[in-house]
Amino acid sequence: MAENKTTILITGGAGFIGTNLCEYFLTKGYFVVCFDNFATGHKHNIAEFLGHENFKLIEGDIRDLAQCKNAVIGVDYVLHQAALGSVPRSINDPITSNEVNVSGFLNMLVASRDAGVKRFVYAASSSTYGDSEALPKVEDKIGKPLSPYAITKYVNELYAEIFSNTYGFETIGLRYFNVYGRRQDPNGAYAAVIPKFVMQLMKHESPIINGDGNFSRDFTYIDNVIQMNELAMLTQNPEAINTVYNTAFGDRTTLNDMVSYLKEYLSEFDTAISTIEVVHGPNRAGDIPHSLASIDKAKRLLNYTPNYSFQDGLKEAVKWYWNNLK
């Protein structure tokens, strides 16, 4: 570790959100340790950091407690992003999702507590709201989980609370709402909807919307998520720690509107994209109909002010995909 430098461990640091966090905190002068097994992350995501004097890669698996203990040596803060995402993946293979998202999470909590880490900030999920129909989603009102993935992310919150209450260990959970942006992987069976649709449109293929397209999401641009991680890591407000926050923009967009914006922004690069038809398929198991976050708590306790609306972020994301993946 670098002497006299604040050290941040980012688990899942080669994944979409993790890579963006690594990049941001390196530019801010921190020493960054990336811990990843490359199950869903990619080495090409962190290739540009490997020669950086303030960057260290540890290839390992959070399901191995000894590897977790090794990763947290000399670490001041943990930003825990490592997880197996995707509701459909968890429905197809609940055991592996549980091993990574619950057992792996607990390993990281124990290792971090034992190493004297100052604070553990972790990726929670809007899926925790489950079957609650209330809109907007407020942190202290949740429903029953609708998927194994949602169960694992809720269990994370319960474990974090127990560690705060029992051991005096500082934790903050960030309930991510449909994060999108640069470096999000468009490939694979469980690719997120925005990068997947962007790639299909760039190939002049028709994107398939699950259902009638009127389901809505609080799509959240990656830079808003980075801001929340930094605020959660550094806050000195005692009331702001040992709790969870919605991490979102605080607005919602239907899937139909999202595709319309994608076509509009992409057609600036390729006019033929504006004429591509959308195909509708069946609804997907475990999907919630609508997602909209209240961000009042984050504004009040963390002074969170998201800089990117959905459309502003989407324009940036589309530009990145066109320049990097065409």
Image (tube, grey):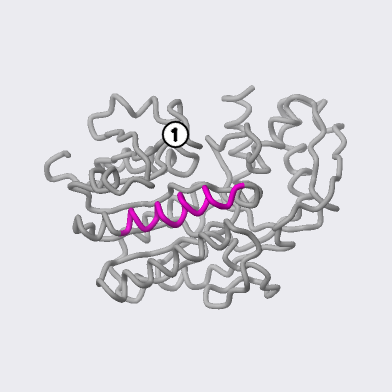
Is 175 positioned to the left or the right of 193 in the image? Answer: left
Where's residue 25, x and y in %? 33, 43
Residue 64 in the figure: left or right of residue 259: left
Give above or below for 257 relative to 241: above
> Is residue 50 left or right of 102 when viewed as pictured?
left
Q: Which residue is depicted at the point 16% across and 39% down? A: 2
Is residue 260 found inside the magenta-colored segment of the image? no
Q: Position of residue 22 (x, y in %)?
A: 37, 40
Q: Identify residue type, mark 1.
A: Phe
Q: Residues within 10 Å of mark 1 (few under 14, many from 20)?
A: some
Q: Quarter of the image containing the C terminus?
A: top right
Q: Position of residue 65 (x, y in %)?
A: 30, 49
The residue under label 1 is 38
Kindly tell me whether residue 6 is visible in this rendering. no
Q: Is residue 108 magenta?
A: yes
Whole-percent x and y of residue 8? 28, 47
- Vertical relation: 179 (above or below) 295: above
Against 180, residue 127 (above or below) is: below
Q: How many marks?
A: 1
- Give the SS element for disc 1: loop
Residue 140 appears in view: yes
- Residue shown at 70% from the left, 73% from the top: 133
Which quarter of the rendered picture does the N terminus lie within?
A: top left
Q: Which residues are magenta?
A: 93-109
Q: Nearer the viewer, residue 209 or 145?
A: 145
Q: Is residue 196 left or right of residue 232?
A: right
